[in-house]
Amino acid sequence: MKTIQFHIRRQDNPYSPPYWQQFEIPYRKGHNVVSALMVIRENPRTRDGTQVDPVAWEFNCMEEVCGACSMVINGRPRQACSTLVDNLEQPIRLEPLSKFPVIRDLMVDRSRMFSDLKKVRAWIEIDGAWDIHQGAPRISPEAWKDNYLYSRCMSCGCCMEACPQYNQSQDFVGPASLATVRLMNAHPTGKYHKTERLHAIMADGGLSDCGNAQNCVQVCPKGIPLTSAIGELGRQVTLQMLQDMFGKSD
């Protein structure tokens, strides 16, 4: 009978050593990694028949929208819900994202990524009055189309996993945070805090820490042009630096 084989890197808690276990389930056409893990969870036995604890992982939307099910699949960071078993070489190797602390098995703590988003002010102020002496903010179809590409980011962490500059020993905020700065700076209301965001990425751990490896754009599940965002921010930061030095011209 045709089967699907998995090698899964497991870890019982944040402080215990990792170990590997092998699992095998009956083949079914159309399985993705999440649905296969669900089958393993129903009867968590290794290939040698040993009863073990169910594998822990995260998932939610099953539509590649929430970003919760990120993991390293056959050496590449991916979304488990959209990765089809039929497209993978077996045995399928599953590992947690290595750039974030492991909670258990394939679950990681991505708190740092969300802290970095706070650091670069990755939001739009919507409360309070905005007296801009004009009607409702308008945006051209061309600008909307460009911005939409960046708005698809789901903070999954795949780009951070692929980035050699993003790790637990460095303060680099990572490509996702930088792309979000580009998006927020282009927003009709968000542009009012553009200077604060640029100063944030001009500090330690910001744009200058990017090594231009361009791995991020290769693994982004949404195809976000992350390197284009970094290039645009480079120009914005240069102009901001000149304005800081010589004063903003009228």
Image (cartoon, helix red, strand yellow):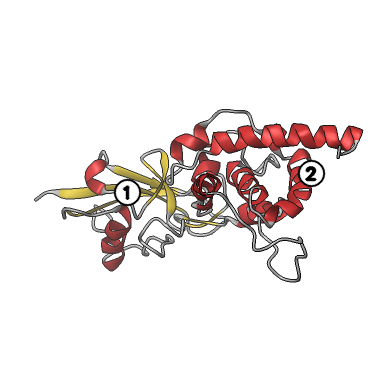
**Which residue is more in the foreground, 103 or 11?**
103
Q: Is residue 246 above or below residue 100?
A: above
Q: Position of residue 83 (x, y in %)?
A: 32, 48
Depth check, front residue: 224 or 26: 224
- Disc 1, SS: loop
State the residue at coordinates (30%, 44%).
92
Observer able to see residue 59 = yes
Q: Position of residue 52 (x, y in %)?
A: 34, 62
Amino acid tagged 1: Thr
Where does residue 206 sit, x and y in percent of width and height? 71, 39
- Residue 163 in sight from this viewpoint: no
Q: Which residue is mark 2?
A: 199
Between label 1 and label 2, give the one nearer the viewer: 2
Tell me: 140 left or right of 126.
left
- Please name whichever residue, 229 or 239, is drawn nearer the observer in this view of the structure: 239
Residue 110 screen position, x and y as percent: 58, 55
Q: Residue at x 31, y 64 (%)?
A: 41
Q: Label 1 neighbourhood size at 10 Å, few (<14), some (14-19), many (20+)? A: some
Closer to the camera, 241 or 3?
241
Please count the marks in the image: 2
- Answer few, some or many: residues within 10 Å of disc 2's Cα (few below 14, many 20 plus, some between 14 and 19): some
Say which label, 1 or 2, has the lower sequence index: 1
Task: Assign a secondary structure to mark 2.
Answer: helix
Amino acid type, callout 2: His
Q: Residue at x 60, y 28 (%)?
A: 212
Side of 66 where 235 appears, left or right: right
* Label of residue 83 in the image: 1
Residue at the extreme left: 1
Q: Residue at x 56, y 28 (%)?
A: 213
Residue 115: image quadrant is bottom right
Distance (Cα) linking label 1 and label 2: 38 Å
